[in-house]
């Protein structure tokens, strides 16, 4: 999650009013089902509402239904603090299409009065069966200055340990911190499964991550006009190390950048990646689906 951690210029209620009814039209369905490997359903339904104008009495079910209609049949709900992690773990137990990850976002860690207690709560949630990942954790040197980086790194190291203890995928938020993310992973020893959420590096960084066996999850940012380096990174990533995500309600793919995002818009990014990499669309969908099951386990 990138935009969520910035200093708010408007309240959530104001954002919700601005975004209400602004979801883009549904894209053409994919030829094979895929997953959204990283979404924030809680923020989406509270700030932007329900795509397609679904029933407000069960907005999560409505969001799942709209996504499934275009071939996005599985979602990974990602935690960014204790509250959202609890919410996600509960939602994953209620809805078969949803799995959860739990964590303290790197920009959350320096704000906490008791980081150790928050980490204990995250660890307790990580033990639940429908929680299949620890994240999004990592380092963010864009939003957090020097004064908060020690707490970020302490939190990141603790999340790595939790992921290894429970055999869960580690989902990393890395913003302007590529070298330091790798340094900490080397220091601690990476878990068996590492996902670089909303991959933001260039071809050189991508090649190093691929060499290490990490998974690169591409968001709508890969469709942005200024993202040439990101497209080069995608082009060299093997199909079996690619995931696709929304980071909803943020990072809406072109041509709808600036409007609210949701899992049903994944086909726009998948088709763009197929064009960028030269991969057959059907083959790419099959690879993404298989990788999702391998990373997060069967739904």
Image (cartoon, rainbow, N blue to C red):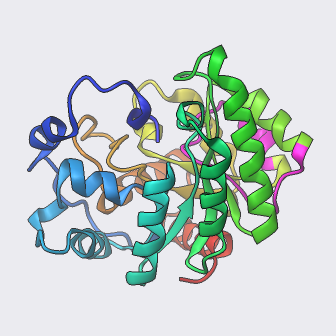
Which residue lies at the image location 24% right of the left edge and 45% below the top edge? 260
Q: Is residue 170 above or below residue 276?
A: below
Give the number of marks.
0
Which residue lies at the image location 46% right of the left edge and 35% below the top edge? 2
Which one is nearer the viewer's eye here, 12 or 63?
Answer: 12
Q: Position of residue 140 (x, y in %)?
A: 60, 29
Which residue lies at the image location 50% right of the left edge and 54% below the top edge? 82
Region rendered in magenta: 188-210
Relative horizontal placement of residue 182, taking residue 274 as reference (left or right): right
Which residue lies at the image location 24% right of the left edge and 41% below the top edge? 256
Q: Is residue 258 magenta?
A: no
Q: Is residue 196 magenta?
A: yes
Relative horizontal placement of residue 64, taking residue 23 as reference (left or right): right
Relative horizontal placement of residue 121, taking residue 170 as reference (left or right): left
Q: Position of residue 179 (x, y in %)?
A: 78, 28
Q: Is residue 105 above or below residue 142?
A: below
Which one is nearer the viewer's eye here, 221 or 185?
Answer: 185
Q: Position of residue 116 (x, y in %)?
A: 68, 47
Judge whether residue 89 can be spotted in this image.
yes
Relative horizontal placement of residue 147, taking residue 190 as reference (left or right): left
Q: Position of residue 122 (x, y in %)?
A: 61, 59
From this viewpoint, which residue is outermost toward the top?
A: 146
Which one is nearer the viewer's eye here, 199 or 56?
Answer: 56
């Amino acid at each position: 999650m990138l935009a969520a951690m910035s200093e708010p210029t408007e309240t959530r209620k104001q954002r919700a009013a601005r975004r209400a009814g602004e979801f883009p039209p549904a894209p053409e369905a994919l030829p094979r089902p895929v997953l959204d490997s990283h979404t924030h359903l809680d923020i989406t339904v509270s700030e932007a509402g329900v795509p397609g104008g679904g029933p407000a009495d069960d907005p999560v079910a409505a969001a799942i239904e709209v996504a499934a209609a275009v071939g996005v049949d599985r979602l990974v709900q990602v935690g960014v603090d204790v509250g959202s992690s609890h919410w996600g773990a509960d939602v994953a137990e209620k809805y078969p299409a949803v799995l959860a990850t739990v964590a303290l976002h790197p920009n959350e860690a320096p704000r906490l009065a008791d980081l150790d207690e928050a980490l204990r709560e995250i660890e307790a949630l990580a033990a639940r069966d429908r929680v299949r990942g620890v994240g999004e954790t990592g380092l963010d040197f864009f939003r957090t200055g020097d004064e908060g980086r020690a707490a970020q790194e302490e939190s990141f190291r603790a999340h790595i340990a939790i992921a290894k203890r429970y055999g869960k995928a580690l989902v990393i938020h890395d913003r302007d911190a590529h070298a330091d993310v790798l340094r900490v992973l080397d220091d601690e020893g990476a878990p068996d499964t590492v996902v670089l959420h909303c991959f933001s590096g260039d071809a050189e960084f991508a090649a190093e991550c691929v060499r290490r066996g990490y998974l690169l999850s591409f968001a709508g940012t890969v469709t942005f006009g200024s993202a040439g380096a990101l497209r080069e990174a995608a082009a060299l990533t093997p199909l079996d190390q690619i995931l696709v995500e929304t980071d909803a309600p943020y990072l809406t793919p072109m041509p709808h950048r600036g409007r609210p995002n949701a899992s049903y818009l994944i086909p726009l990014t998948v088709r763009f990646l197929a064009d960028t990499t030269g991969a057959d669309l059907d083959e790419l969908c099959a690879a993404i689906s298989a990788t999702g099951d391998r990373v997060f386990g069967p739904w």
